[in-house]
Image: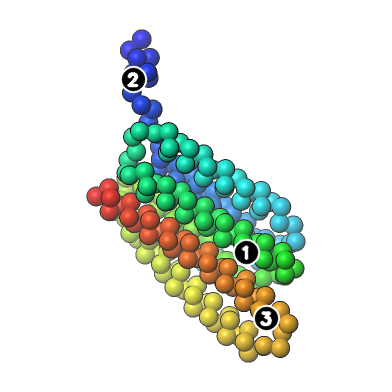
Amino acid sequence: MLQKIKQWILPKEIDFFGMLLNQSRSTQSILGELNRLYTEESSANIEPILTMIRQGKIIRSENLKALNSSFITPIDREALSRAYSQLYWIVLSVKHLVVEIDTYKIYQLKEYEIIFQRLEVALSELTNGFEKLKEKKYETIGENIDQIIHFDNKLIKDYAEILEKMFQEAQSPKLFMHKEILFQLREISKQIHICANLLEDMIFKIN
């Protein structure tokens, strides 16, 4: 009887950091599929990754719905909302890239493998950071954030080197298509970097 009374009176506890972790894991899976699709399989079948992207939208909506219905949160609601939305921006940036690639009919991107790998590893660091947040291992999250910034800087250098090589081969009719693909890859890295900054802000709020 006492347990039932508590359920009626006390607000339900929601694991918001766990939800962030699950959303980050879902986003990490999407980047893994992106890498596989264009550097391993080189396939025109984009439906599997689009399905994963649609699922990412559902996860964000469910997380925001839970946040909106809760009176108690571990940090301010705006910080959590921004993190959920920023993780989805990474997913949206992947969608923009996939749509562009499908429009250009350029499916073999083995030469960009290093960039796809850097994105995947950076997201892995972000997911690990959210895992530490959930487990209250705040003191080491800075290491993950530093690694994300490091990979973002590396990716910009890769971007510039590949672009310079493309300009040397300016007679290629697909030059500007590849330039746009590279821009979208850089945009994904930017969104991951922003999400890492939001994670860092959360640590400041907790401490």
Q: Which mark is residue 175?
A: 3
Q: Amino acid at mark 3?
A: Leu
Q: Which mark is residue 9?
A: 2
Give the structural element (helix, strand or loop) at label 3.
Answer: helix
Q: Nearer the viewer, residue 92 or 142?
A: 92
Mark 2 and mark 3 in contact (Cβ < 8 Å)? no
Q: Is residue 11 above or below residue 36?
A: above
Q: Residue at x 57, y 68 (%)?
A: 185
Using a 10 Å C-alpha cutoff, classify the residue at mark 2 as few (fewer than 14 neighbours), some (14 to 19) or many (20 or more): few
Please provide percent x and percent y for residue 187: 53, 67
Could you tell whether 15 is left or right of 24 in the image?
Answer: left
Q: CA distance from mark 3 to mark 2?
A: 64 Å
In the displayed orientation, state which residue is furthest to the left.
207
Q: Which of pointers 1 and 2 lies earlier in the amino acid sequence? A: 2
Q: Nearer the viewer, residue 47 or 120?
A: 47
Identify residue for label 1: 97
On-image quarter of the N terminus = top left
Q: Which of pointers 3 and 1 lies earlier in the amino acid sequence? A: 1
Q: Is residue 69 above or below residue 200?
A: above
Q: Amino acid at mark 2?
A: Ile
Q: Residue at x 61, y 51 (%)?
A: 53
Mark 2 and mark 1 in contact (Cβ < 8 Å)? no
Which image quarter: residue 201?
bottom left
Q: Residue at x 59, y 60 (%)?
A: 94
Give the structural element (helix, strand or loop) at label 2.
Answer: helix
Please provide percent x and percent y for residue 204: 27, 53
Please provide percent x and percent y for residue 145: 38, 61
Please provide percent x and percent y for residue 68: 43, 37
Give the structural element (helix, strand or loop) at label 1.
Answer: helix
